[in-house]
Amino acid sequence: MARSVLLSTFIFLCVTVIESSILSNISVLYVVPDLVLICAVYFSLLNGKTAGVTNGFISGLLMDFITGVPLGFNCLYRSLLGYLYGLFSSTIIISGIMVPVLSVAIGTVAKTLLVQLIALFFPNVNIYVTGIISYHFLFEFMENVILAPFVFKFLGFFRKYLVIRTTKDRVDDV
């Protein structure tokens, strides 16, 4: 498990730097896609609840440090999403196009709703998302959904280093 968490942390660090440094400076993009969310969904679906919470927390911590929001804001909702997606790790096969698209679409909606809910407890956080019915959400949703199959396919190249247990081990546990 340590190898998987270390590699996923390194991937989160790289993706966070790409998202905050490179993609945020491209003026063509109205909104920056949430690549960290897409990676967290992949890792949670691949390895289960415990790894999902761990990866969600680590990715949230990195986002908290880089974005400057209060410590724990991103950790909370990303850990919740990691746990929820980890629940389905033994029933969902992450291949093809539809599973990444649907899982990231649901994750983007859940992220927006959780951010709105958690922002009630962080009054000093200026959230720029006005809710589900906004251009910001629409563009982020479209970018995440379009990029999801490509990111899942790219992370699939590292699957043997990221997976904690094989499919045979999961079947034996059930």
Image (spheres, helix red, strand yellow):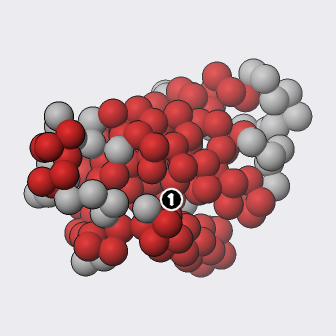
How many numbered tags mark residues here?
Answer: 1
In-front residue for pair 12/102? 12
What crowding class fits label 1: few (fewer than 14 Cα within 10 Å), some (14-19), or many (20 or more)?
many
Q: Looking at the picture, how far across and down is residue 24, in whole percent?
A: 62, 68
Spot the residue most to the front: 172
Q: Amino acid at mark 1?
A: Val
Q: Residue at x 72, y 40 (%)?
A: 73
Residue 28 can be seen, yes or no? no
Q: Residue at x 45, y 36 (%)?
A: 83
Q: Looking at the picture, how far across and down is residue 39, in whole percent?
A: 42, 59
Q: Looking at the picture, how far across and down is residue 138, in whole percent?
A: 43, 41
Residue 65 can be seen, yes or no? yes
Q: Residue at x 43, y 62 (%)?
A: 1
Query: Please, is residue 91 above or below residue 150 in the view?
Result: above
Q: Secondary structure at mark 1?
A: helix
Q: Is residue 13 left or right of residue 98?
A: right
Indicate the quadrant containing the C terminus: top left, top right, bottom left or bottom right.
top left
Q: Looking at the picture, how far across and down is residue 36, in whole percent?
A: 50, 59
Query: Please, is residue 120 above or below residue 70 in the view?
Result: above
Query: Please, is residue 90 above or below residue 159 in the view?
Result: above
Q: Residue under circle 1?
A: 36
Which corner quadrant of the image does residue 9 belong to?
A: bottom right
Q: Residue at x 53, y 71 (%)?
A: 6
Which corner quadrant of the image does residue 127 belong to?
A: top right
In-front residue for pair 126/68? 68
Which corner quadrant of the image does residue 4 belong to?
A: bottom left
Q: Is residue 14 left or right of residue 98?
A: right
